[in-house]
Amino acid sequence: MHNDSFMLQAFVFLLSAVIAVPLAKRVGLGSVMGYLCAGAVIGPFGLGLMGDDVESLMSFAEFGVVLMLFLIGLELDPAVLWRMRISVLGLGGLQVLVTSLLFFAAGLALGFSWQVSLATGSILSLSSTAIVLQTLEEKSLLKTESGQSSFSVLLFQDIAVIPLLAILPLLAMELPELANKTEHIPGWETALKVILVVAAIVLVGRWVSRYLFRIIAETRLRETFTATALMLVVGIALLMNEVGLSPALGTFVAGVVLANSEYRHELESEIEPFKGLLLALFFISVGASIDFDFLLQHPWLISGLLAALIGGKMLVLVILGRLFGLSGKSNSVFTFSLAQGGEFAFVLFTFAENNRVLGTDITAPLTVVVALSMVATPLLMSINERWVQPRLSGNRVQKDNNTADTIDNHEARAIVVGFGRFGQIVGRLLRINGFNITILDHDAVQIDSVRRFGHKVFFGDASRPDLLVSAGIEDAELLVISIDDHNRSMDLVRLVKRHFPHVRILARARGRHQAVELLRAGVDHVERESFHSALRLGREALRSLGFRAYQARRSAELFRHYDELMLQEMVEAPDDEKTRLNLARQNSRDLQDLMQTDMQAEVENQEHNWDRG
Amino acid sequence: MTAASSRALVIYAHPRHQTSRACRQLLAAISDLDEVTIRDLYEEYPDFHINIGHEQSLLRNHQLVIFLFPLYWYSAPSLLKEWQDRVLNFALDEVPGRAGPEQDPLQGRMLWIATSVGASFSSFSAEGGNRYPLEQYLLPYEQTARVCRMAWQTPFMVCQARRKPESVLQRQAQSFRSILLGKLQALDNA
């Protein structure tokens, strides 16, 4: 019975998402807006299809945010993070500080006590990581200047939650002696905890996880790997909760630590679908949590507060963006994207209520306002896109084209699949010449031995589109297929030709027939794995039998030339067994004739004295 | 650049095209012309294995042959020399019983050298470090043209190719282009 109701719930969620998201996308508002609306419709204040316990559902769905930060961490290795330190601390720090002060002052002006003003001010300074990042990613803005700035601010906010959780109880008005007590306990203890936990994560991520993943990978069972990946993230989240830190922050650190791991791409593609579903659930529950009764009872209060929240945030953001040198276009994206309250506000409001810092009279309207501001974000972004951006680009086209969107991603231009005896030579040649390559191999033992030589190798089965995407095939120019299994090569070629036709494909082929098949499937260039070495050996054989070295080379080159011509002929010939056999037989006869005539001609040609005595 | 409408054949030999200044400009200035076919030898034959028959048939189909190369050690880069060694001998073949174009496949065609050097013009003189005028170093080509019964054209030369500002090189490339257009015009009128 219980099971049935769970299935029904799940069905309602999925159905609402399936209906609302395509609709929202059609209108140009993006998936986040779709989920939020779906939530509002099926929520307790709409059709009431969600059951009563929206809050516990929401705290479950917040795990989606945790997964998202883990994935973001995976994309940022420590070096990239270090480069962002100024914008995280400077831009992020100032955003939190100035916004808090602004709302603090507003609170005082409205006649609230300083404790209440400070608590609400700092809580409202936070933005929604989930909504902003999802929306930016959907609009492919995450890797641009504006996207990176927004991300820096969000990252700082996630860190800022930790001290906020420590400070809020101190603001309690009624129980000063409790405040005094808590004041002495957390300080150094919290700091120590943070350091210990982060150190543990780094330690485990750096050294232990590699062996764990390797053992799991050797089982070659994909679901085991999925389970391990999930277990890791859930474990970290639990650990962080236990010591009272933000689970999102913990998994983010874990992600950064694993960003250099050879299992990064595999992890990304395993976690991605879970993140997507849970985030959707999260957005739906945000939509469902909007208290429409309250909204209808106090329309002016709510809309006034909403306007003040969004307006105040935008004011601070636009000034800070200008201060940190964002160009007009980037700054408007930055300003419009971060102008909402965050999911942490819900947590912190509840927390503040429990600690008697804020009363329900304050948190009730503000919770509605924060939820509405989150709903407004996709709308604001669309407004920015349609009406604000065009104007800005009209004014400063030249400058913006050069300055915006310049954050380069350091993804490799070439992907090498299969890093055995063949792929290693290709890969080393590319790297010696300064090209950054991404290597994929499905053999864990192989990866381990290669990694010792300092290569960056990722584990995974390249015939899965999601893994190719996380390996960066969408931005890559070149795919080198150097695996020895012909059928897998063919599958991979078909897959890439279908989904990523822009990529140039070079492939290793076992022999002539495989080469023909690969070329027919659309590979740009094929090398038969033993052809050139055999030819080299043949050349040495000729030498051993008395040819001059250069004479042997000419002969081998001529052989190669005709052999490749015939391969091309076979590619163009109709594809049936009989023609192919005939062609092959005829070719070997022709080759002999042609070579003989040519060698003869060459001898005559060269023996012809150019200066005729 | 189809072989049918093309009248000029540029045999371009530059082993370091990627860092070239002068030759690259010269090539760029004419590469858009329909009447010009460009053979980038180091791109076509990185392994030095020249497709002799193909090169010979190209020669047969063009009236104006241009060798474009940087001067290395008072001669062409080695691949162009290899090309000469392999391809040009057919001009000397004497096939009994035949006459005219069959006998002399290059007869009446023009050979035009365009080359660049790092040194100055003045160094190519009795007083300068290179002791002889640049033209004298190109005598082997002039004689080659004569033996192949081709009409020798006054060479086009760019000096101080490493030091001249880009704008000067560009101007020279433009004059290279207009001389070429003049020659094509003359061919049309003939």
Image: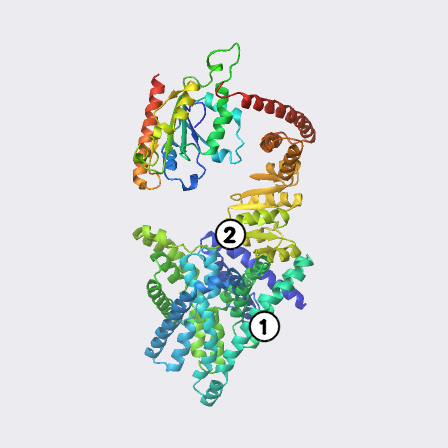
Q: Quadrant of residue A211?
A: bottom right
**Residue A183 drawn above or below residue A602:** below
Distance from Cα at disc 2 to Cα at disc 1: 37 Å
Residue nearest the viewer, comparing B189 with A73: B189
How many neighbours does mark 1 have within 10 angstroms: few (below 14), some (14-19), or many (20 or more)?
A: some
Residue position marked by numbered label 2 in the rendering: A436
Q: Is residue A302 visible?
A: no
Residue A289 image offset from top left, x and y in percent: 50, 69
Residue position marked by numbered label 1 in the rendering: A238
Earlier residue among tags 2 and 1: 1
Q: How many marks?
A: 2
- Residue at position x 40%, y 80% in the image: A116
How many neighbours does mark 2 have within 10 angstroms: few (below 14), some (14-19), or many (20 or more)?
A: some
Q: Secondary structure at mark 1?
A: helix
Q: Is residue B45 visible?
A: yes
Answer left or right for A516 relative to A371. Answer: right
Marks 2 & 1 on one chain: yes
Residue B10 image offset from top left, x and y in percent: 42, 28
Split into 4 quadrants, where in the image is the N terminus of chain B?
top left
Split into 4 quadrants, where in the image is the C terminus of chain B?
top left
Mark 2, mark 1: which one is toward the viewer?
A: 2
Q: Amino acid at mark 2?
A: Asn
Answer left or right for B22 relative to A223. Answer: left
**Residue A37 drawn above or below residue A503:** below
Q: Amino acid at mark 1?
A: Leu
Answer left or right for A567 relative to B110. Answer: right
Q: Secondary structure at mark 2?
A: loop
- Residue at position x 48%, y 75% in the image: A162
Question: Looking at this rendering, what residue extends furthest in the bottom direction?
Answer: A177
